C-alpha cells in the first residue's frame, strides 16, 4: 500500500452483501453496549456470520460482555480478530495498555476505525455491528464517512431526558443520510412477581424518539422493541456470556431475540 492511497474497506464496496448497523445512543448507561453484544450473539445463533466493532472508544465494554479471552493476532498485514460465542470482535480496548485511558483525538480515532474496517480479516460477514460512543461525536461522523451505507439503530430509556438526547444522536442521520432502522427502548419496566409492571424510568421515551425521528427524516421509524429491566441481563453481561445465550427465557432475552430476528 503506497503513500496516500486510502485503505480498501470491503463493507464500503458497492457489491458488499454485509449489512452494517451502527448502534447509537444519546448518553451512556442506557444499555447500548449490552444490546450490541446480545444482538450479535443472537444473530450468530441464528446462523449468521457476525462481526462486532467496539467503537465506544472511551467506554469500551464489549470485550468483557462477550467474554473475549484473546487478543488479536497479526498475520502478514492482516489483524485476525478474536472470536467469542461465534462472533468476531475488535475493540479499541485490545490496543491500549490495560488501565490506560484513551486520550486520542478525532483524526487518530478516524484512522483506528479505518484500520478496524480495512485491516482486520473479517471474512464474509452477513452482519457487522458497530457499538458507537454515546452522543454525536467524531466517531459517528467517521462511521458515516467510511461506511455510507451503514444504518442506525437508536437506543434510549423511556425517560424524557434520555429520549431528547437520543433523538439528537439519531438526527445525525439527517446530515449523514444514513437510514434509521429503528429505536430500541431499554429498561422499559420492572416486572413484579405478581406480573404487574413498575415503570422505573417513566414511559413513552422510545415511541417518542421513533415518532420524532420519523417526522424529521420523512420516513417511518419503528420502535423495534422494549426491553424490561432484567437482573439476568446484567449478571450475564458481567459474566461474559450475553443473556440471549445464558438465559434465553429471561424477559430481556426474549425481546432481544425477537429484535435480532427482525433486523
Ligand atoms: P451503555 O453502553 O449505553 O453505556 P451498558 O450496556 O454498558 O450501557 O449498560 C449499563 C449497565 O446497565 C450495565 O451494567 C448493564 O449490565 C446494565 N443493563 C443494561 N440493560 C439492562 C437491563 N435491561 N436490565 C438490567 N440491567 C441492564
Image (cartoon, helix red, strand yellow):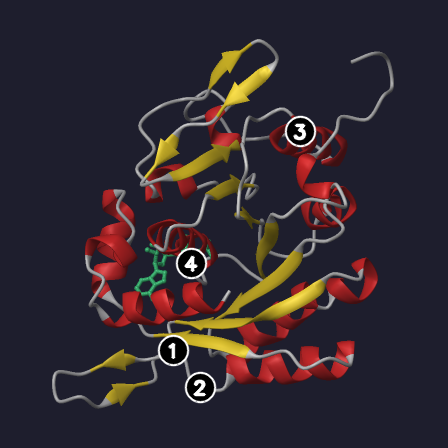
The numbered dot on residue 35 is: 4
Q: Quadrant of the N terminus?
A: top right
Q: Which residue is mark 2?
A: 203
Disc 4 CB within 8 Å of nearest ligand 1 atom: yes
As drawn, 240 above or below 227: above
Q: Residue at x 35, y 65 (%)?
A: 257
Q: CA distance from mark 3 to mark 2?
A: 41 Å
Per the image, the residue denoted by label 3 is 118
Pointer 2 with pointer 1, Cβ within 8 A: yes
**Cβ at disc 1 under 8 Å from ligand 1:** yes
Q: Earlier in the sequence, mark 3 or mark 4?
A: 4
Residue 176 falls in image quadrant: bottom right
Q: CA–CA distance between discs 1 and 4?
A: 14 Å
- Does residue 199 appear in the picture of this structure? yes
Q: Is residue 182 left or right of residue 89?
A: right
Under circle 1, the secondary element is loop
- How many numbered circles are shown? 4
**Which mark is drawn over residue 188?**
1
Please tell me which residue is depicted at 69% across the width and 32% down the height of the picture. Answer: 114
Mark closest to the chain's N terminus, 1 or 4:
4
Of label 4 and label 2, which has the lower sequence position?
4
Residue extending furthest toward the top: 76
Residue located at (77% from left, 76% from top): 217
Find numbered disc 4 in the image and state the secondary structure of the residue it sits on: helix
Amino acid at each position: 500500500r503506497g503513500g496516500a492511497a486510502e485503505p480498501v474497506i470491503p463493507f464500503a464496496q458497492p457489491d458488499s452483501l454485509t449489512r452494517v448497523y451502527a448502534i447509537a445512543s444519546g448518553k451512556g448507561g442506557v444499555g447500548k453496549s449490552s444490546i450490541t453484544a446480545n444482538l450479535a450473539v443472537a444473530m450468530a445463533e441464528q446462523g449468521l456470520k457476525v462481526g462486532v466493532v467496539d467503537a465506544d472508544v472511551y467506554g469500551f465494554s464489549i470485550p468483557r460482555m462477550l467474554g473475549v479471552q484473546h487478543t488479536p493476532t497479526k498475520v502478514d498485514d492482516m489483524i485476525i480478530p478474536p472470536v467469542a460465542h461465534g462472533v468476531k470482535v475488535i475493540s479499541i480496548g485490545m490496543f491500549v495498555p490495560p488501565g490506560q485511558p484513551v486520550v486520542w483525538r478525532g483524526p487518530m480515532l478516524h484512522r483506528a476505525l479505518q484500520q478496524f474496517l480495512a485491516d482486520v480479516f473479517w471474512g464474509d460477514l452477513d452482519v457487522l455491528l458497530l457499538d458507537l460512543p454515546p452522543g454525536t461525536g467524531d466517531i459517528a461522523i467517521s462511521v458515516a464517512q467510511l461506511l455510507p451505507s451503514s444504518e442506525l439503530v437508536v437506543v434510549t430509556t423511556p425517560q424524557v431526558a434520555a429520549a431528547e438526547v437520543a433523538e439528537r444522536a439519531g438526527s445525525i442521520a439527517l446530515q449523514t443520510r444514513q437510514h434509521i432502522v429503528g429505536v430500541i427502548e431499554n429498561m422499559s419496566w420492572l416486572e413484579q412477581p405478581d406480573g404487574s409492571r413498575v415503570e422505573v424510568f417513566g414511559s413513552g421515551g422510545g415511541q417518542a424518539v421513533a415518532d420524532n425521528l420519523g417526522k424529521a427524516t420523512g420516513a417511518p421509524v419503528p420502535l423495534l422493541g422494549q426491553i424490561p429491566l432484567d437482573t439476568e441481563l446484567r449478571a450475564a453481561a458481567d459474566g461474559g456470556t450475553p443473556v440471549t445465550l445464558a438465559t434465553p427465557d429471561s424477559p430481556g432475552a426474549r425481546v432481544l431475540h425477537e429484535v435480532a430476528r427482525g433486523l
